[in-house]
Amino acid sequence: MKKNFGSIKHVLYKYRAIFFIVGLASASVVGALHLFNVSNAKNVELVTRSFLNTAQKTFLDLETNTASMLSATLEALLSNREIAARFAARDRQGLYRLTRPLFEHLKSQNNITHWLFFNPEPEQTCFLRVHVPHLYGEKVNRITMDISIKTKELAVGKELGQTALALRAVHPFYYENRLIGYMELGVEMADFFIMLKKQTGNEYGLVVRKDFLDETQWASVIAEKKIPNNWNDMEHLLLINKTSDSLNPAEFTKELENPGTIPDEGIVLQKLSGNRREYVRGIIPFYDAANRKIGGVIIRKDITPIFNAMQTQKEEIILLLLLFMGIITFFMIFFHKRAEKELRKYRSRLEEMVKESTAELREINRRLNLEIKDHKEAKRALEMEARAREEAEQKQINAVKHAERSARMASIGVMAAGITHEINQPLNAIKVTADSIQYWHRRNPGILPVSFVDQLNIITRSVQRIVEITQHMRAFWVVPQTPGISEIDINQAVNNAVSLTRQQILAHGIRYLLNLDNDCSRLTFKGNLIHIEQIIVNIIVNAIHALDGQDRQNKEIKLSTNRHEQWVVLEIEDNGPGLPSVDIDKLFDPFFSTNNSGEGMGLGLAIVKRYIDTYNGIIEARNNPDSGAVFTIKFPVSQTPGEKQKDPHENTTDR
């Protein structure tokens, strides 16, 4: 027994280094597992907060853009005298036949789902629903309608109507200087969330407290859509719509019980697992036209690929640690036995050699230490000198850049600030006086001469023009806020910009051509989608202005996308008069314009240049050999690991 115990003790002592390595490796595996679990949890939380912020920003941007689109469309429709004449004559059938084709076009092009005409107050009844013509005659009591009646101006908001919950825009309708009623356009929230899903890839649902709804009205909505009534599915809440059947609102019931407590930045919920999928979830508040929190938008994002990648990485690290532990153990045993054999052979000889060499080794060691110390000091001095030189060079470069920018912006900032300050006070006085007279005229029609009223309208438009000028000046010299950055598909930005300007292009007798690269995976880069769309819209509008001065047939604007090496390339060309060679170098300077009509301040392309610079892009301008101008815009593609950005070494022309 004692012999066996002694043998075990001898083995433990003999291989103590091996046991230490094995124990250390085991502790490393356990520690790595713990660190990975903590890191994964933090990563999931960061992903959830990031996706929720992005979804909320996209929701607000889409709502703003949709409201702007509805407002612009309303203005265009209100100027149609044939529609106004039919509405003023109360010719419902004639009005329906006239507006139905327009509605189908607006529905397909701009996702507009509702078009309504209302009789003026005090009757305030629905005269015609173009989207459901058999529903009319009931009195309308809605917040947006009340605001428009009170202000006699545009009112926009989200609320439940007779047929759907929609984002609505209402505007007074005048014909021959008299109020004949109101016109309303709307985008149903179901279509709104479908657009959101297409932009973000997330699943969305809208849940509203029943206190803010009417059961009878909701029943009519469900009956019109021919789907089961879900009023009694939840006690206090009602699911208005959702983008996926797998999205279960019961998962969010506790957080939605009191919508008024949902913070504006939203609520981050715990990760959800099911059906071999991993999801992150969140809720953002939903406001109606009265600015009340009536519910919440539930959002879910599938992070299964990200989560699986983290799990795979964890498994790979653990496997590597285990493999490393095995290799180390094997080599420790192998070299331990071999070294033990060799040590026994040379032990006696080494003892003699050690005695003879001790003094020599001490001297060598002393000299080596001195050399190492000198080498370290020299290396440290060289590193400090190199670092100081790099810092000095960088400071010099930054100073030059700052001086150049300050020189360019100083004159603009001072001039813009002075002009806006000096103009605002008399401008406000003029606007208040003109608005007061117009308001008095609307309350007392027929007293003022028509020519006097026309002059007031000219004053109002002139004041608005001055306001636009000062706003453009501020837009250029005030440094823009840091935009929200995401992966951008250039084809999507082009399609969005063309959708916004299509009616204007066609109205000017211009044809547009799209030559887009079909491989969208090659055409992505980092940026802000709204800014990129503004860049494209500005250049398209410039092309429209250039073509307006041409007396020719077959006016065209062509937009092309492709990828050249590590750059996403967009080309916008027209067959107009082209750019004068003497002015090409100045196109992107503030306040420079080739428009002789007096329209515009020459800030549009300057702002375009600033946006492109923000995303490390390049813009070039040149003339076509035949006719017209060509603008080439380049953005660096989203880099993959190991991929290095190449410099095109191409001359860029500031505009």
Image (cartoon, rainbow, N blue to C red):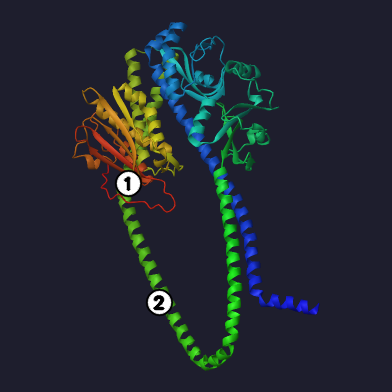
Give percent across and percent down for residue 351: 57, 91
Name the image quarter holding the N terminus.
Answer: bottom right
Instruction: Depth check: give the residue in front, 395 or 313.
Output: 313
| Of the image marks 2 and 1, the number of the one nearer the N terminus | 2
- Label 2, residues with CA under 10 Å away: few <14, some 14-19, many ≥20: few
Quarter assignment of residue 271: top right
Q: Residue at x 51, y 40 (%)?
A: 54
| Element type at mark 1 | helix
Tell me residue 306's x, y (percent). 55, 46
Q: Nearer the viewer, mark 2 or mark 1?
A: 2
Q: Quadrant of residue 346?
A: bottom right
The secondary structure type at the circle numbered 2 is helix
117 is higher (above) or lower (below) than 596: above
Task: Classify residue 307 as left or right of residue 518.
Answer: right
Q: CA distance from mark 2 to mark 1?
A: 46 Å
Circle 2/circle 1 CB separation < 8 Å: no
Residue occupied by mark 2: 378
Identified at 32% across, 14% down, the residue is 451
Which residue is tagged 1?
409
Left or right of residue 93: residue 163: right
Residue 552 in picture, x, y percent from top left = 21, 23
Q: Is residue 620 left or right of residue 424?
A: left
Q: Residues within 10 Å of mark 1 (few under 14, many from 20)?
A: some
Vertical comparison of 386 with 482: above or below: below
Q: What's the amino acid at mark 2?
A: Ala
- Asked whether residue 217 is in view, the answer is yes
Identify which amino acid the numbered label 1 is placed on: Met
**Which label was assigned to residue 552?**
none
